[in-house]
Every structure is written in C-alpha cells, then in structure tokens.
Image (tube, coloured by chain):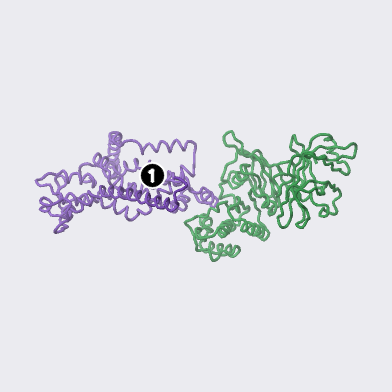
Chain colours: A green, B purple
Amino acid sequence: MAFLEIDGLRKRFGTVEILKGINVELEKGGFLVLVGPSGCGKSTLLNTIAGLETITSGEIRVDGRAINDLHPSKRDIAMVFQSYALYPNMTVAGNISFGMEMRGVPADERQKAIDKVAKVLQIGHLLQRKPSQLSGGQRQRVAMGRALVRDPKLFLFDEPLSNLDAKLRVDMRIEIKRLHATTGTTIVYVTHDQIEAMTLATKIAVMRDGEVQQFGTPAEIYNNPTNIFVADFMGSPAMNLVPATIGGNGNALSVVLQRDGREPISLPMAGAPAGLSAFKDKPIIFGVRPEALTDPEGAERNASNIATADCHIEVIEPAGSDTFAVTNLGGKAVVARLRADAKIQPGTVTPLAFNLTKAVFFDPATEKRIL
Amino acid sequence: MSAVTSPAREVSTGIRARTVNRIVIYGLLALFALFYLMPLFVMLVTSFKTMDEIQNGNMLALPQSPTLEPWFKAWGETCVGLTCAGIKGYFWNSIKMVVPAVLISTLLGALNGYVLTKWRFRGHTLVFGLMLFACFIPFQSVLLPMATILGSLGRFGVTLQNSTGFSFGLGNPTVNLVFVHVVYGLGFTTLFFRNYYEAFPTELIKAAQVDGASFFQIFRRIMLPNSMPIFVVTVIYQFTNIWNDFLFASAYAGTGDAMPMTVALNNVVNTSTGVVEYNVNMAAAMIAALPTLLVYVVAGRYFVRGLMAGAVKG
C-alpha cells in the first residue's frame, strides 16, 4: 500500500469537470511532481489534497487514512504557496510559529522548534524581521520553514519557485532537493516547468485538461512518452515530431520523411518491430529528441540502430555547451543537438545521424504511442 | 509647425504655453480655496470678537481685542432652548453616540467584507448588491418606518424592564441613534472593506487555514492587522457622517437630554432672546466642528492612501 493514494478523484464546478478521475500513488519519502500547462488542473488537485477545495467523488488517503473529509489543519500536511503567503503583520518567527500557536503548543516548545528550523534553513538572523524586509529568496526560505516546523506527513508545494529570478530558482531547486534527501519527507510539488519536474521528481504526473496523461518516473516519462502531448511537453528543446510514412517491404521497413524540393529521406529500421508493420504505407508521427539527432562523430557509439542522412541546415544556434542545428523535415523545423565545436555552417548540406533506438512513433489519429 | 522653425523656438513656445497653463490652473485653485475658506475665516474671527466689535466693525477685520469669552459662554452658559447650561452636555451626548456607532459599523463592515470576499457563498453578489442599497436610499424615506421600529423596540424595552428589571438600553434615544447609524452605515463600511479585501491575497487565508486558524482567528489575526488604511478611511468617513448627522438626530433624539450636538447647535442659533450673539453662535459651531477636524488631522494621511488602495481592484 502506497503512502499517498489518490483514487478516482473527480472535481466538478457546476457542469464543468475540472478533474476527471485522477489515480495517482506515491511511496513514503517519494517526490511527486504534478506538471502540465496552465489550466490543466494541477493546482486544483494540490488544493484538494490540502483540503482547500472540496472534491466531488473519489478518495484521498495518506498512510492508509482517508483524509478527504478532514479540515486542512487536521490532515497533517504543510503547504508552501506560490506567493509564499507570509503574514505581513508578523515577524519571521511569528510566521513560523503561527500554526503551533493555533494548535496550542506551549511557548518554550515553540521557541525550540523555531530555533531548530532556523538552523536548518540558515534564517536565524532574520527571525525578528517582517516579511516586507526580506528578499525573494529569504521569503522562500521562511515559507519553507513554516512548512518544515510542522513535521507533517506530507509536504505540498504550489509552484514555489516561479516568483524567483532564474539563478535563484536553480539554487532553491537544489536546496529543495537536498532538503528532501536529508529529511526524507514525502512531497507533492506542482509546477509548469518541465525541468523542475525532471530534476526533482521521483514520480511525475503529466496532466492535461484534468486528466493524468502519463504517470511514471522521470526517465519513463522522458524516454517512453505514451502520447504526443507528453512527448512534446517534456524536454527542452522539445522532441522533434515529424509527419512520416512507413515504407519498405517484408521485414525491411524504413521511415520515410518528405522534404521540400529534395529527395525524401529513408531511414532503414533494423529488425522490423512488430507494431510498426501494421502501419506500412500509412502516415505516422516520427519522434526523435534533439540529442538523438546529431553529427555522425558525436553519435552514441553503442547504439544498435543509427541511420545517417544528408540534411540541409537552415539555421544554427550556438548555445555554448551545445550547438543546435535546424533543418526542415516533413514540413517541420527539426532541431539537432551537436557538440559545441561541431564544424557546421548554415546553408550547407551535412550528414546527420538519427539514433533510431531512441526514436518513438505515434499514431496521428489517436496521438497515442505505437512504438 | 513647419520644418523651417528652429527647435529652440519650439522649445520656448512650449515652455511659455506651459507657464500660462500653470498660472490659470493655480489661479483657479487659489480662487476656489478662497471661496471655501472664507466662511471658516469669518466664523473663526467672529468667535473671538466682542459683541460691540461685531455690531460696529467689518466682518472680515481681525479682532481688535481677542477674547475667549464667547467660547466659554458657548461651552458652559448659552441657552439651548429653555435650559441655559451651554453645549457641553450635548457635546458628550454626541461622543457617547458616535464612538460606539462608528466602531460597531466599522467592525461589522470589516466582517461583511471578509465574508463576501474570502468565504463566498452562493448569491454573494446579490447580497452585496442589496447591501449597497443602504448607500443609495434617501434617508428621509426611512424616517417613518424606522420610527415605528424604534417605537416597537422601546415597548419591548419597557417589557424587559418590567420582567427582568433591566431594559438593555432599548428605548434609550442614544442607543436608538447608535442602532440607526449602524444600520445605515453598514452599506458604506461593507463597500469599503469588500473592495479592499477583494485585492487581499487569498493565499494568506489558505495558509492560515492549513495552520489551523478558525474563521474568527483568521479575521482577528490576519485580516484586521493588515487593514489599517481602509480601517482609518472607514472610521473617518463614518465619524464625519454620524457626527454631522442632523436628520436622524433631530427625528429620534430632537428633544430632551440625549439631544446630540448638531441639534443642540441648531437650537442655540434659533433661540431668540433679544440680541443674537453671533460670537457665541460661531464659537459653538466651531466647537461642534472640532472633533471631525481632529480626526482628519490625526488620521488624514491614511485617508488618500486608503482610498487609493481600495480603488485599484474590485
């Protein structure tokens, strides 16, 4: 039995269904990230776990106990809000101890707990300040301190890093990860940033329109997306999704990519995969991540199925650590990821290596994964 | 302007036009300020003059031998109707009526605003819309119905007096006025607080809920301490309105010992025993205006700030 179990959860506002039957579970000490575009219901889902929103049907269990009818304060949870939600009229110490005060914890115990948390988060020197006198990163720490001091069963984070600048966001991300590693707490975390999701999570739930599109480990989500939406949403730059057809005959199948004013590219698939032969001569969506499309020298040595094709390079984007080259396949801009020092010029025709072991195929009609 | 005109000339005409604009604007403002302040000046000057000087002198002239006599007389000796004990008793009457009325209506308005923005229920806009009617109805139209209600409350008070020995203040004119002002002030105070709380971050309430604070704990510990600007605005507004009210005061406490300041002032001026003592009348009027003036001076800097804060959203 998992530590956090969400079972057939539905939430309806009038006739609009916001959450359409969510099933998710998380082991103790796990880090679940709910990720998706805005309006996908991820924050609503978090709020129902917190008890700040009611649910229409389904059940939420923490450690085997159904909590969906309990008041937020009785659920043994702590929450960090996007705006931090620090009480402006109280000092940092007052903010951290407010919850304990409400629960009637004696003053000396409160002080001990404040000191302990202040030490962990290194905010001891800020305790007597008001939130308005703190910087963004400091407020973030105080907000986490307020959650930590409860020592709850479940931590809920609602886009906690989205108000920070880019550099601080990376620092705090590492901080949160370290905190999770050292304290071993169970965390549910909402973000729209797929990099945060990939780096922090032990489990990711990719959501769209109130439904979980895919639930799994970061590696599963990244390497084996179940549909076009997940493939497109996770990863930066996004996966190249190119309309293609399956050609060839018998066991020798190949992926055929059309090009403007040039010969189509034909990429041979070694060992005809069973699922693909059913789509012979039919349109499919061919998905390849930028890092699986590179210069022949930079291609992965031990990949079993690499096909090389000459491509016309339209634009190159040197990003420092890598160079991205843009070519046009199947009427779409396709991004290849090359070594930083790759000798490549825009406007030339250069061979690119397709790592077909990493390629994925989708049915254009259902948008579901074929292979 | 043609392209031939030199840039320097363009700049100088621009500056001249702006100077003319400034002179017109400030001139008009000064003129209106003069109109506005003139009566106050005359009142103030007259209240320090002797009767001789008023009868023989120029209305705008400064007092030749300033005296506080009219002020003392207004405070302690002048005749209000048939009693000649000054206006001091009525001044305290007003204080006793205004302070509870302001505090109760402001706190209830804050509570209403809190519920209407943070604990929304089905039909909350309708309820708010109906409450706003209190801001728009002419008070003359409610004089008679309210008199009937106050009459019933008074009779109920007598019943309570007979059965329990204590009337709970029902039927007391001061209590009646507090009741009326709270009822008709609620529309405005609710409007003020609702608009202010509309922009108040809801995440703070959610955080407090997770922290285990109850409905009233959130109100007292989170909402009220962060409502200072709108609280001050509401208090100033209510204090000025209730202190200056003449209609309800004359209708429900127009005679007798509970008469508020405004009615008493009217009676001072209307009492005609021989000579009209302009200096005493002016001094009494100044005394009547002092508390509102004081409230503005003490809390005024919050006033503009608070009005702006409420105006941004909602």
Instruction: Answer with left or right where residue A105 lies relative to residue B16.
Output: right
Q: Nearer the viewer, residue A51 or A62?
A: A51
Amino acid type, label 1: Thr
In the displayed structure, A109 sits above or below B86; it is below
Neighbourhood count class around disc 1 (C-alpha, 10 Å): few under 14, some 14–19, many 20 upward? many
> Which is more toward the observer, B104 or A250?
A250
Q: Position of residue A102 (x, y in %)?
A: 51, 54
Q: Quadrant of the C terminus of chain A?
A: top right
Q: Across the whole image, how many numbered discs are drawn on residues?
A: 1
Chain under numbered label 1: B
Which residue corresponds to the image point at 86% horizontal and 39% vertical from the top-left? A274
x and y, in percent, of residue B130 in the image: 41, 36
Percent x, y of residue A284: 78, 37
Front-lying residue, A288 or A51: A288
Q: Residue furthest front?
A: B4
Secondary structure of the residue carrying tag 1 is: helix
Q: Is residue B230 above or below residue A125?
A: above
Which residue is disc 1 drawn over?
B189
